[in-house]
Image (cartoon, rainbow, N blue to C red):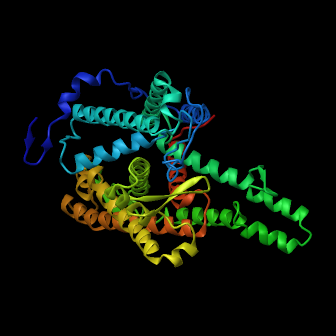
Amino acid sequence: MGKSEDSGFRILPYLRPVVGFLPEVEKPTKVIPLRDKLIWTLLALLIFLVSSQIPLYGITKVVGDDPMFWSRMILASNRGTLMELGIGPIVTAGMIMQLLVGSKIIAVDNSNKEDKELSNAAQKILAILIALFEAVAYVFSGMYGDLESIGTVKALMIILQLVAASIMVSLLDDTLNNGYGMVSAISLFIATNVCEELLWKSFSPLFENGEYEGAFVALFHFIGTVPNKFTALRKSFYRDTAPNLNNVLATVFVFLVVNYFQGFQVNIAIHNKQQRGHSESYPIKLFYTSNMPIILQSTLLSNLFFVSRLLYNRFPNFLPVRLLGKWRETSYGGQSMPVSGLVYYISPPNSVLNMINDPLHAVTYILFILVSCAVFSRTWIEVSGSSAKDVARNLKDQNITAYGGTEKLLYKKLNKYIPIAAYFGGVCIGILSLIADFLGAIGSGTGILLTCGIIYEFYAEFMKETRSGQSVF
C-alpha cells in the first residue's frame, strides 16, 4: 500500500475484487423526459413512506430512550421501522470519504473514471459497515428489548433488515442521482420528513388533556368551546403544552427569509473563447455550499449524541464517558436529556428561560453552531471539488475564461468571492438555524433550512427542464 508525497495512500485499487458484488444503478443511456423523472421521484418517495411504516420483524416493543432523538427528522428515520437508520449511514460514509480524500489521506484522481468508480464503491462499502455497526449497537444495547427474550435468530433478523433497508436507501439515492429523478433521494426524504412534521403539528386531530394537538384544529376548538374569545385566541397563540399558532407563523417567516436569501449572488462575466462575441454570467450564490454545512453538522452531532448515550448507559461511572456527556434519567417528553459534559454544551437549550439560567450553555451552543457551519462550509468546497481552483480548471477545460481577460483573471475573481461565500454563507445558515430554533419554528431550524434549500433546488431543476422544452404532459 503505497503513499506518494502529494497523493496520499493508494488503497482504492484493492477494492476491485469486491466492486462487482456491490449493487448499483447504471446511468441512463438517453435523456430521461421530465414526466418520467417525476414518476421515478414519486416512486422513490412512495417506497420511503411505506418503509417508514413497516415495523421491524422480530421486535416485541421499542424500549428505553431514543439515542437518535436529536436527529430523526434530519436523518429521515422512523423508530422501530425499516427506516430506523434512515439516511444516517449513507451521509456519514459520504462525510468520512470526503474528509479522507480532501485531506489527501486517500488518493483519488477525479479525472480518472476508474478512480471515481472505486471511490463510490468505497463509500458504499463504508455505508454498509456503518449500518451494520449501528444495527448491532441498537440490538445489543437493548433498544428492542432484552437480548435473551428476543433470541439469537430474531436478533440476527433485525440486524439483517436494518442493513438491507440501508442498502435499499442507497440504491434509491443512486437511481435519482444518476439522472432518473429531480433531486437526490437523501434531499427528498429529509424534505418529506420535515413537511410531514409541519402538517401533522398544524392539523393533527389527536385529542389529549382537553386539547387538540394540531395548532389550527386547536384554534377552532378553542373558539367554539371557550366563552371568552380573547382567551381562546391567547391559548391558540401561546399554549406551551402543544404546537401553537406562533410556532406555525415562525416556520412560515423563516421559510420566506431563507427563500429571500436564496436569490443573493455575485455574477462573474465569462465568455467562451471558441465563440466570438459570446458572453454570459457565472453565478456565485451566498449559499454557495447549499445545505451541506448543516447536513454535516447534524450528522456529526447525531453520531456524537448516539455514542454518548450508549456509552453512558453502559458505563455511567467511567470518567471519560461522563466528560463526554452525562444524561438525566428522568424523562423529558419521553426522552432523556444531557445535563453535563461536552454534548450538553453543544445541545440546543430547551427554552429561553434555560438560556438565561445557564448563559455559558447558550453562548457555547451559539458559537458552536456558527463556527462549525462556517468551518464545514469552507472545508466542503475543498473536498468536494468546488473551490476556486477546481472551478477555474473546469471552466478552462470548457474553453471558458473571464470576459475581456485571461484564465488568470478568472481564477483571481473566483478566488475573491468563493471563499467569502463559503464562510459568510455558512455563518448565515447558522444564524438562520438559531433564529428558527429560538422562535420555536416547527421542524427545528436545521430541518427548515434543509427543506427550503431542497424545495428551491427542486423548483430550479423543474424550471430548467421546462425551459429546455420538456413537459409534464
Percent coordinates x, y for residue 110 in the rendering? 23, 41
Q: Nearer the viewer, residue 354 or 5?
A: 354
Viewport quadrant of the C terminus: top right
Percent coordinates x, y for residue 180 in the rendering? 48, 33
Q: Is residue 51 left or right of residue 158?
A: right
- Residue 120 appearing in the image: yes
Looking at the rendering, which quadrant does residue 47 occupy? top right
The answer to whether residue 258 is above or below residue 61 is below
- Residue 31 appearing in the image: no
Q: Is residue 191 left or right of residue 217?
A: left
Q: Residue at x 71, y 55 (%)?
A: 202
The answer to whether residue 294 is above or below residue 85 is below
Percent coordinates x, y for residue 417 in the rendering? 31, 66
Q: Nearer the viewer, residue 112 or 361?
A: 361
Q: Residue at x 77, y 58 (%)?
A: 216
Residue extending farthest right: 227
Q: Residue at x 38, y 24 (%)?
A: 23
Q: Is residue 20 left or right of residue 303?
A: left
Percent coordinates x, y for residue 17 in the rendering? 23, 22
Q: Nearer the viewer, residue 360 or 427?
A: 360
Q: Residue at x 56, y 53 (%)?
A: 335
Viewport quadrant of the N terminus: top left
Q: How many marks?
A: 0
